[in-house]
Image (tube, grey):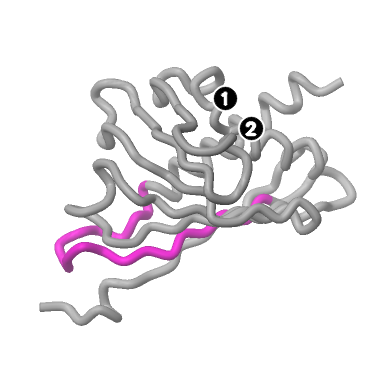
Amino acid sequence: MASSAELKGRLETVEEIKSPADKFWVACKEISSLMPIIYPNVFKSIEDIVGDGKSPGSTRFIQYVEGHPIGNALERIDSIDDENMTATYSVIGGDFIGDFFTKFCPSVKIIPKENGCLAKWAVDYEKANEDVADPHVVVEFIVGVLHTLDDYVLKNSN
């Protein structure tokens, strides 16, 4: 049996984003309403069930399209820092928690650059058991989400 330390991990990615940092940050905070629109082949719906979906303590129910490896997830916003453009979350329920992970806590930080910005996304996790793979596939998925969101912001900025 694996020790607790062997089940814990952290993965991260840093992505070049073409959108201005302030506009991309606003879009990151609007993720509940934007994802089903710009990613309808993945997200069936995202419903804010506690709070406004933009502030700490808010909880959202994410339902993925039929056939997606994850059926649903319950995610809580733990912190939002507009000045530093950072946010932390906890996945607290759904198909992801229990059989696969006992802890799954993503974070995002937007770092302004002269042209565009960097999006640093990371996840601290604890696997339910040693048979669960590290969540590299989630990081790959998030990379796609970040770039799709960037394209959306670029096309819809005034």
Over which residues does the magenta segment extend? 119-137
Q: Which mark is residue 33?
A: 1
Which percent across, then down, holds residue 116?
81, 43
Q: Quadrant of residue 8?
A: bottom left
Image height check: is 36 above or below 74?
Answer: above
Secondary structure of the residue carrying numbered label 1: helix
Callout 1 amino acid: Ser
- Find the residue positioned furthest to the front: 51
Percent position of residue 55, x then y: 62, 45
- Location of mark 2 (residue): 30
| Residue at the (45%, 33%) spot, across then down | 49
The amino acid type of the residue labelled 2 equals Glu
Q: Residue 45, relative to residue 144: is it above or below?
A: above
Which residue does the image show at 37% across and 64% down from the upper left?
125
Question: CB under 8 Å between callouts 1 and 2?
Answer: yes
Helix, strand or loop status at disc 2 = loop
Tell me the CA gap for discs 1 and 2: 6 Å
The image quadrant where one finds the C terminus is top right
Magenta span has 122?
yes
In which quadrant of the rendered image does the N terminus lie?
bottom left
